[in-house]
Image (cartoon, rainbow, N blue to C red):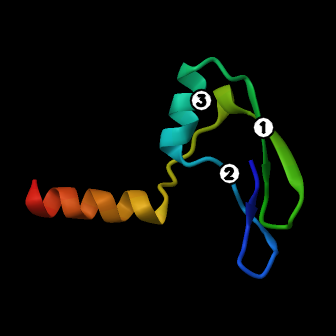
Amino acid sequence: MIRVSDSDHIRDAMPCSRCCTSLKNLGFKKVVFSNSEGNMEMINIQKVKNTHLSRSQLITEKISKKFG
């Protein structure tokens, strides 16, 4: 996975916690993504403990709780 800014800089693209869960459930063992230094990083997805949610996910949760 790679994420590129509007100004063509490589950004951190580590999968969020929900994506990590989905990747684990689909049987993925390793994931490669761009990190905040602009390098590619490989991790064992089965060992990742990630609690990060994307901005979009946080907004969706906030709206869901409001209109519940």
Q: For the residue carrying disc 2, how many other residues have a C-alpha within 10 Å: few (<14), some (14-19), or many (20+)? A: many
Considering only vertical position in the picture, is 20 above or below 55?
above
Q: What residue type is labelled 2?
A: Met
Question: Residue 34's x, y, as percent?
Answer: 80, 55
In-front residue for pair 63/50: 63
* Circle nearer the N terminus (3, 1): 3
| CB atoms of marks 3 and 1 within 8 Å | no
Q: Which mark is residue 43?
A: 1
When asked about the image quadrant of residue 19, the answer is: top right
Question: Residue 31's x, y, as percent?
Answer: 75, 36
Q: Distance between the residues labelled 2 and 1?
A: 9 Å
Give the residue drawn at x 10%, y 60%.
Answer: 67
Q: Residue 14 carries which label?
A: 2
Considering only vertical position in the picture, is 6 above or below 40?
below
* Circle nearer the N terminus (2, 3): 2
Q: Please name the residue that numbered disc 3 is placed on.
A: 23
When asked about the image quadrant of residue 46, the answer is: top right
Question: Residue 27's x, y, as percent?
Answer: 63, 17
| CB atoms of marks 2 and 1 within 8 Å | yes
Q: Farthest residue to the bottom: give it.
A: 7
Q: Farthest residue to the right: give it.
A: 39
Q: Please, what secondary structure does the residue beneath circle 2 have?
A: loop
Q: Which amino acid does label 1 sit on?
A: Ile
Considering only vertical position in the picture, is 44 above or below 12?
above
